[in-house]
Amino acid sequence: MQVTEPRGRATSAVSNAELPFSDETSPQALLSNDEASETDLDSETEEPEVKSKRPPENSFSQQRLAAVNPVFGAKTVIPLLLALGIILVPLGVAMWYASEKTQDLQIEYTQCEIQANGDYWTPIPQEYVTYNVRNTSAIPSAMWKLRRDTSFPWPEEQNVCEIQFVLVDDLDGPLRFFYRLKNFYQNHRRYAKSFSDDQMLGKAASVSVVKDTAGINCEPISTDAAGKIIYPCGLIANSLFNDTFNPTFLGVNGTSDDFQMSAQNIAWTSNSNRFRKTKYNHTQIVPPPNWAKMFPDGYNETNIPDILTWEEFQNWMYTSAFPDFRKLALQNTQDNMPAGIYQVDIGLHFPVLPYKGEKYFLLSQSSVIGGKNPFLGYVWIATGGVCLLLGIFVLIMKIVRPRKSGDPNLLSWNREAFKAAEKEE
């Protein structure tokens, strides 16, 4: 009988007479034919390759890239702190100086419809008027008067607040005219998310899109009682600030010529990427509830608002992070405003008294850092001052108590060992 050995080993012939095997017989000869066959099959079966989750073998995936581990010693920290202080303090002073040179005036007109007289001019209470100008010694009191504009069919919309203010010195351009609201919380979470991105982009968004989109949707002002889509929908658009400002500031009693402001170019030019003319048909949409007096007969083929060119609307749709904010309404970037007495006519349509809000107008110059706001200058000066103080402190410590950088003897466990050794001694 011939016994087949496992693959990779030499075979040998064995006679029946030699069985049982002698001491010289190889242990492989003990295998029967069946066992040898099974051994051959097992050896021929390849084990399946196991996929490894090990990252590729390179410096990036194995995190062996060369790295810089800077050690900040006194020679590095002291020049760095002093350099920062020397740079930041002069820049902060320059910003503060630019802010101080900016002149503006602010008048609160919240109480005009209550306190102003309809027959003659009365002084505006001093607490409502703020002048930030170079010469404040002899500024006459601002005046106001309330008149009725009967061109509006609704009595509550007929009030016009006429305000006269005095410029003692010329006001150099560019000039910007803002309205300011106080205690109006545009930062409320539900309010800030109540609009439709699709509508702003000009798409004819469906009811489900404006009403049921997760996260940002127009609820609770998405459709009217009949189920028609409101355009533009949402709380932000519905609460649009609608006090009106006459862009012509009238010169009073010949003290100056009229000064012309403009509502053009008061929004970012990049807004064309966010606001587009709508694709809705006028039969598909209705105005927001608070716009009923602006569109008493609803929309038609010619009066659907084009939000691409409506810059006042664009400014309003950018919600403020604080309940006290201001937004640009008019500007004149070319002319200087001569000294004199000017009159501003304000149509009173936006109510603030029911929620104890306040509204102002602000006429301001513009500088390289914007309007009058010294806060940025103060921050830079303070930061630079702290850097200078820290740099000087580290320099003094380096001179008074010098030590070797990276000295292992100063490690906490080494200090403890030294103390223990001293006690033993």
Image: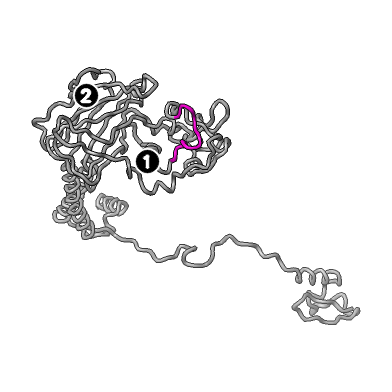
From this view, report whether residue 402 is shown above or below residue 297: below
Look at the image and say whether residue 257 sits in the magenta stretch: no
Q: Is disc 1 surrounded by few (<14), some (14 to 19) or many (20+) residues within 10 Å?
A: many
Residue in the foreground of this view, choosing between 30 and 48? 48
x and y percent of residue 52 in the render? 60, 62
Residue in the foreground of this view, choosing between 143 and 404? 143
Which residue is at a point 57% across and 38% down the rendered structure image? Answer: 206
Q: Is disc 2 surrounded by few (<14), some (14 to 19) or many (20+) residues within 10 Å?
A: many
Which residue is at a point 17% across and 57% down the rendered structure image? Answer: 402
Residue in the foreground of this view, choosing between 405 and 93? 93
Q: Between marks 1 and 2, how big is the CA–CA gap?
A: 29 Å
Which residue is at a point 70% across and 64% down the rendered structure image? Answer: 48
x and y percent of residue 361 in the render? 26, 32
Q: Where does label 2 land, which residue? A: 144
From this view, report whether residue 103 is shown above or below residue 14: above
Q: Quadrant of residue 109?
A: top left
Left or right: where does residue 284 sit relative to residue 172?
right
Residue 311's tag is 1
Residue in the foreground of this view, choosing between 227 and 391? 227
Left or right: where does residue 48 sit relative to residue 249?
right
Disc 1 secondary structure class: helix
x and y percent of residue 290 in the render? 44, 27
The residues colored magenta run 295-306
Look at the image and say whether residue 301 sits in the magenta stretch: yes
Tag 1 and tag 2, C-beta contact below 8 Å: no
Left or right: where does residue 158 sit relative to residue 1?
left
- Specify the amino acid type for callout 1: Glu
- Specify the amino acid type for callout 2: Trp
